[in-house]
Amino acid sequence: MERNPVETTASAAPRLRATGLCKRYGAVQALLDVDFELAPGEIVALLGENGAGKSTLVKVLSGLIIPDTGEIEIDGERVDLSSSAKSQAAGIAVVQQEYSTVGALSIAENLVLGRANAPFIWAGRALRDEAVRLLNEVGLGHLDPKTKVENLSVAEMQLLEIARVLSRDAKIVIFDEPTAALSDAESVRVLEVVRNLAAKGISVVYVTHRLPEVFEIADRVAIFRNGLSLPPLPIAGATVEKVIELMLGRELGSMFPERAESFGEERLRIEEAVVAGLVAPVSITARRGEILGLTGQLGSGADLVVKAIANEAEVLAGRIVVDGNPLTTRTRAEGLKRGITYCSPDRKRNGIFAGVSILKNLSSSWLRSTATAGVISSRVERDRANGYATSFAIDSKRLGANVGQLSGGNQQKVALAKWLGNDPTIFLVEEPTRGVDVGARSDIYAKLRGLCDLGMTIVVSSSDTAEVLGLCDTIATFYHGELVAVRPAAEWTEDGLVAAVMNRSDRP
């Protein structure tokens, strides 16, 4: 669906105008004299590397933090956004990346949860009617408002978050990585809702690391770098290369490293494995030095195969063979002894320890190996952690820093690097760059390819079509719990891969 660009702020009175915003945290200048404008019905993509200042601006607009200096106007009037309640009263709503719904409550109950202006009389039929109206607006009209939120898919929960925002009659909606946890196919529904909001005159700030989405929906691009706001760029005059260069302050070069020209012997074989959650047995192999990509829409089953190898999903029949020998006792401990490591897609819950240092995170999976007679050698721990940090482009001078304070990209690097101390031969990774900026993505892709060049086998489960096509050597597609096709990456086109994951087509 094509959008006609709205009038820019040069010819239309801005809905939102922020001028001279500054925010400092100790020695870190998060925002430095930032200016930002947004016209009625305009979609502005807010871009930049993690740590560039995007999140700080969003928090200022949503009332979570107060800037040191600067002014904010909405429809020409200066506003006080010193609290979340004041931000909402001014007509600003935020669709967060992290869901704020309560799983045990119904859809209808979640839609009015936390609304200061929700009518007290909303109950029974009145509540249901309001829920039906909002669900229809976001394409969820097929759902029963009585359904518990815990029974929804990830895509449905994201659209429900948007419906909650619509219930507040906001004039400005900020989307913070709304499609980070969605497949390309599922993201289409979210983008359509964003377009519809703009068509009704609602102004949209769209924060994302997925650059193709920017060129689908945005009118302008606002790029932040090191706390500074660069001059806005009309989408009509932008290219992916130009946007990346402005974000990084340099040319990125090729996002993906060159693929391997040849591979070693077979390292991993899955033979007629019946995995809980899949509807058909899976047979697939991976070789030394190869990156095998498994892809499909969320719920397709691609992730279950990775989890089965890692003993995170139950294998009911069939077998998994590593270096010619079957895995017998199905435990994570056995997998580690056999050289199998697994990096979870949810780094905040299962990938890092946010409250401790980079050093302790990096050594968490192999700390026992540094001990003699039960006494840990701090020197050995630091020396090894320093090497793994350097290999993933993590600043070794910051080993004492709290991981929770790092950008998403650096947190992901830590989540990956901590497994290197186990000397893995098979590295299982789900969604390796979810919520990661373009510069960190390039670093991660280069490191994964470098590990393969040293003889490792990597199995990646990803719902990002561009990532799978650019990174992997062999691609396996899944649809509704079934393995559909396995082909060398060079035999797939982007259109063919999208078709395969959306409608079970196995056309290259």
Image (cartoon, rainbow, N blue to C red):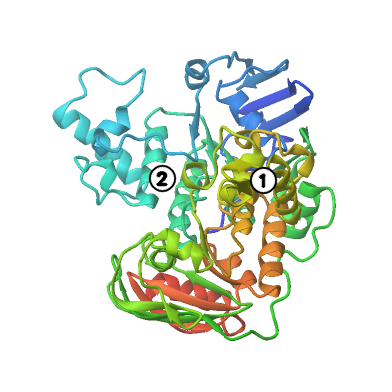
Q: 10 Å neighbourhood of mark 2: few (<14), some, or many (≥20)?
A: many
Q: Is residue 150 visible?
A: yes
Q: Closer to the N terminus: mark 2 or mark 1?
A: 2
Residue 158 is tagged as 2
Q: Is residue 505 visible?
A: no
**Above or below 267: residue 387:** above
Q: Which residue is mark 1?
A: 410
- In the rendered image, residue 475, in percent from the top left (x then y), is placed at 52, 77
> Nearest the camera: 311 or 211?
311
Q: Quadrant of residue 211?
A: bottom right
Q: Quadrant of residue 66?
A: top right
Task: Specify the amino acid type for callout 2.
Answer: Gln
Q: Residue at x 46, y 29 (%)?
A: 170
Q: Residue at x 50, y 19 (%)?
A: 84
Whether pointer 2 and pointer 1 mark residues with C-beta atoms closer than 8 Å, the reply is no
- In the rendered image, residue 393, in percent from the top left (x then y), is placed at 75, 52
Residue 310 is tagged as none
Element assignment for label 1: helix
**Above or below 112: residue 256:** below
List the single residue furthest toward the left. 124
Task: Specify the amino acid type for callout 1.
Answer: Asn
- In the rendered image, residue 486, in percent from the top left (x then y), is placed at 47, 82
Element assignment for label 2: helix
